[in-house]
Amino acid sequence: MENNNAIILHLSVLIILSCLLAYLWGKKRNYSNKFHIDYIIVNIILLILIPVISLNLIIFDIYKAVIANLLLHTASQIAFILHVESAIKGYKIKIKKKILYLFLLNVVVLILTILNIRIIGYETTINKIAAIIIEAKDASYYSDVLIVKWISSILLMLYLIRMCTKNIKESITIKRKRLYKFWVFTYCIINIEAALIGGMYYLGVFDEAFSNNINMIIRINIALNLVFLLINPAILNYIPGISELSIFKKVSKKNYFLILKKAIEKQKLYLRPKLTIKEIETITGISVKNIRAAILLNTKNNFNDYINEIRINYGTKLIADGFLNKHTTIALGHKCGFSSHQTFFRAFKKKHSSTPKQYYLENS
């Protein structure tokens, strides 16, 4: 009976996700939204593979099928993150190195598990987590992949929350910010909750008497993860409308960026430690919205990062002119317009992959 229910659930999810894929790929994807919607399409394809593997439509033994599905889910989370970051920033984001390394860690642990090599090797006392039969080989067989998977999920979701919180306010492509932010945060909460509950249950934190209830919660979380895009129909209709085209055409035609660049560099506005986008609006007569669009279109940066990059270029020139022969790196940061030496050091390292002092010694 339980197996029949699982088959019905997997078939239902497979049909729903296939219809969703056809809807987004066939009807909604276009030139102006593909920079972010392609990642959602990849996310759906990866999620489709999970029930396909679970139903043995692709031949795997039961042990490898479970491990493969865990890796597919991690990959789908990364695709979702890339969609959100691309949609918010207005251009196609490439995978960050730290996220890639986290995924590769999952791949390595998967390979080691298949080779029967375990690093953590925790022997659980439970015999099932939702559809995962723990006792299939031995009590520690899945320990490494499960624990690394849960930790990865939490880290990925924390990254997504931080990135969204930091950037959505300045986004020119996301108009319905509250709706989109709520949707992203709901996704993060579902995934963090699933990782925490699954991890604590596996490690024996919960009493065995609650095992049926815990398994039911985990099953619900799995189902929510697989059909998350359908939870809120408003966001499903809104996502394809996130477009980069119209505002970018406008700012490109009117040469807003050249006006901005000239004003900022000629008047040395970047040397003001507390320079704001509103001040630039007042000086140039270009609206805040168009300033953000012009900078994004031409530099792929937000306003603060663009100003900091100009400051770092100025600081690099000062180093070449011998400024650090007589002054400290903190003084250099203040000279460039930074109000905080920590911000200066971070921005400098981002640009040159070294601290100001290291850069000075290497190039003197």
Image: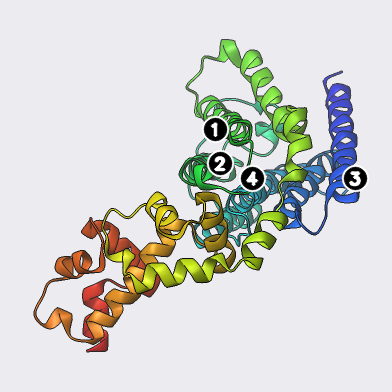
Could you tell me if residue 353 is visible in this image?
no
Q: CA distance from mark 2 to mark 3?
A: 27 Å
Answer with the quarter of the image where residue 47 lies.
top right
Are the two marked residues, 4 and 2, in contact with CB atoms closer than 8 angstroms? Answer: yes
Residue 345 appears left or right of 51: left
Q: Give the answer, above or below, for where 154 lies relative to 106.
A: above
User: Looking at the image, which is closer to me, 272 or 240?
Assistant: 272
Going 89% across and 26% down the picture, which residue do you hit?
8
Q: Name the element at disc 4.
A: helix
N-term mark: 3 or 4:
3
- Dot 3: few (<14), some (14–19), or many (≥20) neighbours within 10 Å? few
Q: Which mark is residue 192?
A: 1
Label 2 or label 3, whichever comes before in sequence order: 3
Q: In 3D space, how far apart are the residues under numbered discs 2 and 1 (Cα atoms)?
A: 7 Å
Q: Which mark is first along the chain, 2 or 4?
A: 4
The Cα–Cα distance between marks 4 and 2, rounded to whole angstroms, is 8 Å
- Marks 2 & 1, CB-CB < 8 Å contact: yes
Q: Nearer the viewer, mark 4 or mark 2?
A: 4
Residue underneath mark 2? 153
Which amino acid does the dot numbered 3 rest on? Ala
- Indicate the position of residue 188 as horizontal and vertical percent values: 57, 35
Relative to 160, does residue 36 appear above or below in the rendering?
below
Q: Which residue is mark 3?
A: 22
Residue 87 visible, this orientation: yes
Q: Quadrant of the N terminus?
A: top right
Q: Is residue 106 left or right of residue 48?
A: left
The kind of secondary structure element at disc 3 is helix
Q: Where is residue 303? Give x, y as percent.
A: 45, 57
Helix, strand, or loop for circle 1?
helix
How would you rate the neighbour count of disc 4 (Cα within 10 Å): few for under 14, some for 14-19, many for 20 or more?
Answer: many
